[in-house]
Image (spheres, rainbow, N blue to C red):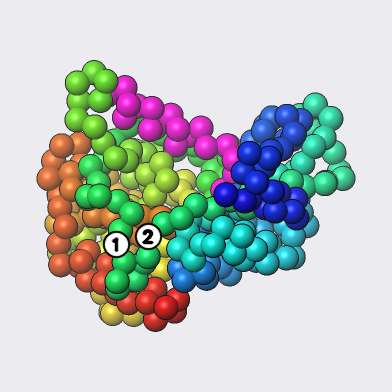
Amino acid sequence: MQYHVDGTLVPEDEATVSVHDRGFMYGDAAFETLRAYGGDPFQWDAHRERLGRTAETLGFADAVPEDLRERVDETLAANDLEEAYVRLSVTRGVQPGKLTPGPDVDPTVVVICKGLQRGGLDGEPVWDEPASVQTVRTRRIPSEAVPADAKTHNYLNGILGRLELRTAAAAGGEPADECLIRDMDGNLAEGATSNLFFVTDNGLRTPSTDLDLLPGVTRDVVMDIARGEEFPVETGHYSLDALRDADEAFLTNSTWEIRPISTVDGISVGTGPMTKLLQRLFDERIEARHY
């Protein structure tokens, strides 16, 4: 594999950054993950805009290079990939070992990728089966402490949630695919790397962005598709019981696309007609735009 590091394609085993890089030392970095279908990054403008917003939140908006899309294209071409997972990282770069950032930024910019199967109508999901999910004690960091809509290298919140799943499985519990993280008030927020949807008699439901969560790009696409079909779509504050009582539920992210939820804390939820229809409509959109 070849990765893009600071404007140059290099072999994977040479794709390194300094131990003094602030992304390594402090998590002082912005990133995005996205999928490429047919060699074309999905929802590129939305991902690029969110990366810029995160960098602006961290105080180095100008560090995101203008030719970032070209670097992505070059990385895909160098690895002969059209179907791929792509990760973009922009750090504040190397600075003296002190917490307060210096005013001058020499960013580190990295693009990595790996192959995935085809998407769209003729594709297969990257997951083997619907997800079992489990609520965890770890709560979502309040936006007043760390802005929830900033996608930074500091992913300890999600890591701690996933570690709870491992601990529970080691103690004899059923292994879970994703954790469900609530906010400090007990409202459902999101998964470690996913957004949550569920279906009731009243339509499609998803936690509101006025909660502490990261609004995913795929989340926005699913909501757009649902509204285009005139499905009732509601965002709000929801309890765990609301999810457990749902008719259907699913998770979204760039890699999984739409992944049905099979169980919540061992309680069966399962796939239903709306989830299946949204999956088909999502695949149709991918097919039309990328193949």
Is residue 140 toward the left or the right of residue 207 in the image?
right
User: Tag 2's secondary structure?
Assistant: loop
Check disc 1 and give the amino acid type.
Answer: Glu
Q: Which mark is residue 117?
A: 2
Which of disc 2 and disc 1 is earlier in sequence? 2
Is residue 55 toward the left or the right of residue 163 in the image?
right
x then y, percent, for residue 144: 57, 41
Check disc 2 and give the amino acid type.
Answer: Gln
Is residue 279 toward the left or the right of residue 73 in the image?
left
Count the marks: how many?
2
x then y, percent, for residue 12: 62, 43
Pointer 1 with pointer 2, Cβ within 8 A: yes
The answer to whether residue 150 shows anywhere in this view is no
What distance separates the C-alpha of mark 1 from that of mark 2? 7 Å
> Camera-side residue: 175 or 290?
290
Residue 22 covered by magenta stretch: no
Position above or below: 177 against 273: above
Q: Main secondary structure of the magenta part?
A: helix
Is residue 224 toward the left or the right of residue 239 in the image?
right
